[in-house]
Amino acid sequence: MKYSCKSFLTSSIIFFVSICPVWAHNYNEQGICTDAGCTDPYEPPVLQDRWYLLSNAGNVEWFSALVNQGGSDVNLWGKMVADIDFTNVTHTPIGVGEGTKFNGKFDGQGHRILNLKLRTTSDLQGFFGGLRGGGTTVRNLILDKSCVINGKQRVGGIAAFAQTTGSSPIIIENCINEANITGTSTGVGGILGGSLSPHPAIHIRNCINTGIVRGSGESATIAGWLGDNAGSLVENCYNTGRLMGLDSSKRNMVRHGGSSAIHNLYEFYNNSTYTQGIKKDWLTSSPISSGELCYFLFRGQNADVWRQTIGEDESPLPFGESLKVFLCGKANCDGTLIEGESFFSNDDEGLVVSGHQFEKGHCVVCGALQPDYAFPTRKVFLMAGQSNADGRPAIGTMPQYIQDFANNGGSKFCYWSYANGTQAAWDMFGGKLVPYMPYTDNNTTSRCGFDGIVYHLIEEALQERFYVIKESRGGTAIDTRCSSSGDLWWNAAPGWLATAAPRSGHSLALEFTENIGLCIDNVLSQLQEGYEIQCIMWHQGESDRSQAASYHDNLLQLVSYLRSYLVSKTGVERYATLPFIAGTVNRNSTQYNAQVEQAVLQLAEEDENFHVVDMSDCKLGSDNLHFDAAGCVDAAQRMFDKLTSLGLLDEEDPTGIKDVQEHKGARSSSGQREIYDLSGRQMGSGNLRRGIYIQGNRKLVK
């Protein structure tokens, strides 16, 4: 029984001292003190093994008050041991502001927050206010549909904001927001409102939003603004709630900058302008209830987080006692399901995976290589330039095959390496060649342009593995007297290059050649079948319009520099005349300059290996600067046609050696095919000098 200390004061002081050594209060079922004039309004929770056990609203508010007083007490651990009803209880966000943020652990254990009402006009509103970087964790929490959270800027269901970097990321995992979240300004999200500078690394995984999210712009259903920390991650989440406040980027689930990893998201609110989480090739007609979504949410994770008892659970949950979902039936070798022959079940009835279907040494389904196949020399393409080469259309507006690259793990045949002058992209791609997938540092709005469509066309034509090394950055110029995004230039003047460096040293040309060299050393030179660089594709010039009179000489110098580097790196003299293919700027572009265009045309007249692709009328988007999806398709087709006309996509590169044909398949005593030089003279296999040879009627590049 709990006693009223106020009643003891009206009786005997001696009796109070002997019977009531600790001030006692009367608390109702919600943990709120019912004594008149009570100075300790909230019932303290039980402390067990460092965890505060939260069983009612009073416990939560006591915990919040302890966090919000600041000092060392911000690093607290709280654990819900029951659903908690906030009817008629005013909640103060845990971590009330920038000066006092929560820096501990919170485990909802799958329990619900019920009837919590936050209706204010203030910033930073949510169940949690601020989370601090450095290992803060919030998990297994449900904000029930009976809750409402209103505020101004940075308003979120689970947390309003995150701030302050630390050695470990903030983790929000296995959380569900069903509440309607409203902000009258920006940074509104179902799980997280918005990050504040300095932006911490934030990991949001296995979360669900079903509530309506309303903002005045810059809002999203999972995270209204994730920040620009390259260590951030959002994965394995889905949304069914309506979004109001979508910004022009059409990023409906997560808004962020930098190169945060965003993958395995699923959007179920039907809006044709959304660019994130769209999956059109569901096997079942009801992926949420059938178990299909559940399967795809936990696929690839180390732990079976997502569970759903099919026929009982309406949707998958990231915690609880429901059953695991298995994929059964038949699938292709790339994991895609065979319609009509695959299904999802709580019983593991097994999955039969079809074998590879090899043609020309590659599986036409997944791109796997056929063992012991004598592959032709691998083709390598170089791609470079600024924003239209970099790409700006939203992936959701691009052809389905581009969306498939993004959704299905990348290309079967195109392997690429991409750099853009940032350390984040370099860490991800530098010196590596991986299956092509549109790179989206602004999540689905960037790094997907006409080049991706060119790769698709090459892939369809060759049906065999090829490689792309790309360097591009929007707003970049050659001439250093021009303005340039990120203070990066394509300048190739020897004096300037002598003082420059890749990335922070402002040189795209140096980074491009550095990456080419690493890709050659790490991958291409290791190919038994050899490789051959086909050409450099280029689209740039808009940012050089203020120094248009110098564009001819500047571009000529860059072309010469790149060709010379390739000769020096490989020892292959023909790269001194490597085809350079430049696309022109649309004449309706706000950054079109006739003198820049004329400089490109003049180079084509002077150099028989410099080629121009007319892109002057390829359709632009609403900014009158970047190709839209239709413009990308048109520009790519024209670039592809040029590659074809130059013979760069021929299956067998001409060697000019006709008398080697009779030796095809001839082998030495060791069982290896004989090697010939370009004059048809048989060579020994040991200590070959750099150059081009013929082995089995195929090119061998040393």
Image (tube, rainbow, N blue to C red):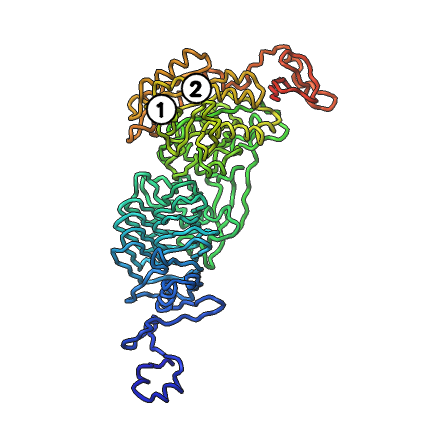
In the rendered image, the vertical position of residue 437 relative to residue 605, given as above or below: below
In the rendered image, the vertical position of residue 87 relative to residue 139, given as above or below: below
In the rendered image, the vertical position of residue 229 relative to residue 357, given as above or below: below
Q: Nearer the viewer, residue 522 or 149?
A: 522
Looking at the rendered structure, the number of numbered marks drawn on it comes to 2
Splitting the image into 4 quarters, where does residue 374 fall?
top right
Q: Residue at x 29, y 31 (%)?
A: 623
* Percent x, y of residue 600: 38, 17
* Percent x, y of residue 215: 28, 48
Neighbor class of circle 1 (other Cα within 10 Å; few <14, some 14-19, many 20+) is many
Question: From this viewpoint, is residue 514 visible?
Answer: yes
Q: Nearer the viewer, residue 573 or 234?
A: 573
Q: Nearer the viewer, residue 409 or 622?
A: 622
Q: Which residue is mark 1?
A: 544
Quick one: SS at disc 2? strand
Q: Which residue is mark 2?
A: 581
Question: From this viewpoint, is residue 290 visible?
Answer: no
Quick one: SS at disc 1? helix
In the picture as drawn, the residue positioned furthest to the right comes out as 669
Three-letter code, disc 1: Asp
Q: Is residue 352 left or right of residue 33?
A: right
Query: Could you tell me which quadrant the C terminus lies in?
Result: top right
Query: Could you tell me which quadrant the N terminus lies in?
Result: bottom left
Nearer to us: label 2 or label 1? 1
Three-letter code, disc 2: Ile
Q: Is residue 590 left or right of residue 555?
A: left
Q: Nearer the viewer, residue 478 or 529?
A: 478
